[in-house]
């Protein structure tokens, strides 16, 4: 604990010296989330991370999350230095959507508006008309549908299917999935619900249809935290990455949160209760990066200029 305290103090001093601020996702280590809160940083969902980094005056943003979050921060703030604790923090959705194959898919469907999830590389965003996050997807797609547009959607097929069901929009889906959410098991969830009949079920829409179908609330990470605070229940079964429990306990103290069951041997992952890439963000790496200036995020300026278009469009729309 004394060593931990010294490490925390070192990071706080470095943040000040370097005019740096922490921008963290809800799925990161609770210790890191706590430190972000204590130092004037921010813990949030993907949309709000982008917004906060853009509006904060610090000259260095330290993005604690996965690579697409660092890239989005850099694209929105080319004049700022963007650091990440580990540049190898990927995302299975991003990995499932290589830019060249995606461009070929778009070329085959030139009549469709291209909508990509935030969880994609800068190169994929550079090919898109709109970026969306889980918290904004329904509103954006409803808006496009009202304008008579047909949509090409990538990369999360579960989120895409849910948005299509909710909006009735014409959406052609790419075949990607999140290793964490895809491993939630519908039958085991039904058994757990039977053991806790009074519990409400909160589900992130990256989960399979049979899991979403059992939800009392479906939404983004910030939506899930808000639902736990607002809903009139004491017990919740939660289908999303368990890093979120830190903020859920803060938002709804005294309530009980139970992890939704995962398969363990899902189609794509053998042990994905935790996101393996979010888990790469730790205090030790953070201190090293601040000390050495290593792990700076760079995005090719031509790609960044094009990728800024769908990102800006969302920020202006979701204002
Ligand atoms: P949100 O926080 O925007 O809901 O995204 C979830 C996610 O999977 C980020 O990796
Ligand atoms: Fe990607 Fe899923 Fe990890 Fe989020 S939790 S970063 S969607 S793999």
Image (cartoon, rainbow, N blue to C red):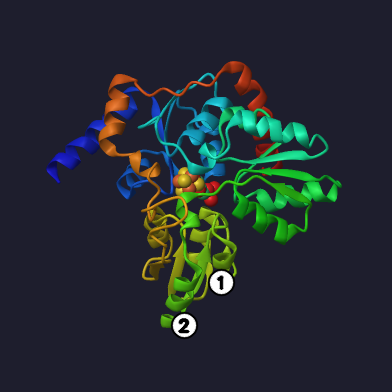
Q: How many neighbours does mark 2 have within 10 angstroms: few (below 14), some (14-19), or many (20 or more)?
A: few
From the top left corner, tell me how far across and down residue 244 is, in percent: 42, 55
Residue at 56% in and 72% down:
214
Residue at 50% in and 36% down:
69
Mark 1 and ligand 1: say if the CB distance to the nearest ligand atom is below 8 Å: no
From the top left corner, tell me how far across and down residue 304 is, in percent: 60, 23
Query: From what the image shows, is residue 256 above or below residue 310?
Result: below
Which of the pair 93/43 is nearer the observer?
A: 93
Q: State the residue position of label 1.
A: 214
Q: Is residue 36 left or right of residue 207?
A: left
For the question of whether residue 128 can be seen, the reply is no
Q: State the residue position of label 2.
A: 197
Residue at 59% in and 17% down:
301
C-alpha distance separating marks 2 and 1:
12 Å
Residue at 45% in and 69% down:
237
Name the quadrant of the C terminus.
Answer: top right
Which of the pair 227/202 is nearer the observer?
A: 202
Q: Tell me the element at label 1.
A: loop
Image quarter for residue 306? top right
């Amino acid at each position: 604990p004394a060593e931990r305290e010294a490490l925390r103090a070192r990071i706080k001093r470095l943040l000040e010296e370097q005019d740096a601020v922490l921008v963290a996702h809800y799925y990161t280590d609770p210790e890191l989330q706590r430190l972000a809160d204590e130092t004037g940083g921010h813990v949030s969902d993907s949309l709000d991370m982008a917004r906060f980094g853009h509006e904060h005056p610090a000259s260095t943003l330290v993005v604690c999350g996965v690579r697409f979050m660092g890239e989005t921060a850099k694209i929105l703030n080319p004049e700022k230095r963007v650091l990440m604790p580990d540049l190898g923090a990927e995302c299975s959705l991003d990995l499932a959507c290589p830019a060249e194959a995606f461009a070929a898919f778009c070329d085959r469907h030139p009549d469709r508006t291209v909508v990509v999830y935030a969880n994609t590389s800068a190169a994929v965003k550079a090919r898109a008309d709109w970026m969306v996050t889980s918290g904004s997807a329904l509103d954006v797609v409803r808006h496009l549908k009202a304008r008579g547009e047909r949509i090409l959607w990538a990369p999360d097929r579960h989120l895409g299917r849910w948005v299509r069901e909710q909006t009735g929009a014409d959406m052609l889906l790419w075949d990607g999935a999140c290793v964490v959410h895809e491993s939630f098991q519908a039958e085991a969830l039904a058994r757990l619900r039977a053991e806790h009949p009074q519990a409400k079920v909160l589900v992130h829409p990256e989960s399979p249809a049979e899991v979403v179908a059992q939800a009392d609330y479906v939404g983004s990470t910030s939506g899930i935290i808000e639902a736990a605070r607002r809903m009139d229940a004491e017990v919740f079964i939660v289908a999303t990455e368990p890093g979120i429990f830190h903020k859920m306990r803060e938002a709804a103290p005294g309530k009980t949160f139970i992890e939704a069951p995962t398969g363990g041997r899902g189609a794509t992952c053998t042990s994905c209760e935790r996101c393996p890439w979010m888990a790469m963000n730790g205090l030790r790496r953070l201190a090293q990066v601040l000390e050495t200036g290593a792990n700076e995020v760079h995005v090719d300026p031509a790609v960044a200029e094009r990728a800024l278009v769908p990102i800006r469009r969302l920020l202006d729309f979701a204002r």
